Amino acid sequence: MKVVGYLHNSDLLLEDEKGVMVIGGSHYVLSLGDQVEIDSVIDEQAKLYQVKISFASADHSMWHEDEIQVRFCGDREALKSYLDATTVH
């Protein structure tokens, strides 16, 4: 999935042809265009995953391992509801 946006609380919006995902907790500073691939589940209940990250600034030439927490996964319509429910107005 590609990083396509920044959200509140340092969360990132990822998107691919299957849908969108909101993630947080990366040990790296991710930028627009970076790629994140879920590798394996660390803790399913906590939604904690092992991922591989490639950086657009390095022309996606290397993969780096990291752990992230998935805060949301779904389609654009469900994302709107998630953001309405989690954003302080």
Image (tube, helix red, strand yellow):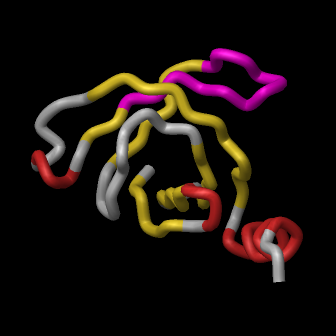
Q: Which residue appears at 33% of the width and 58% of the height?
A: 31
Q: Count numbered badges in the picture.
A: 0
Locate residue 80 relative to residue 14 in the image: left or right.
right
What stretch of residues is rendered in magenta?
A: 41-52
Give percent across and percent down for residue 46.
78, 27
Residue furthest to the right: 85
The quarter of the picture where residue 42 lies is top right
Residue 44 is covered by the magenta coloring: yes
Please give the name of the residue rendered at 11% of the width and 49% of the height, measured from the top-left corner: 59
Magenta region, main secondary structure: strand
Viewer-nearest residue: 41 or 86:
86
Q: Where is residue 23 in the image (x, y as percent from the top left)?
A: 59, 48
Residue at the spot 79% in from the left edge and 72% down from the top edge = 87
Q: Is residue 20 above or below residue 59?
A: below
Q: Where is residue 58 in the image (x, y as percent from the top left)?
A: 11, 46
Q: Residue pushed farthest top?
A: 42
Q: In this view, does 17 lie above or below 71?
A: below
User: Which quarter of the figure has residue 69?
Assistant: top right
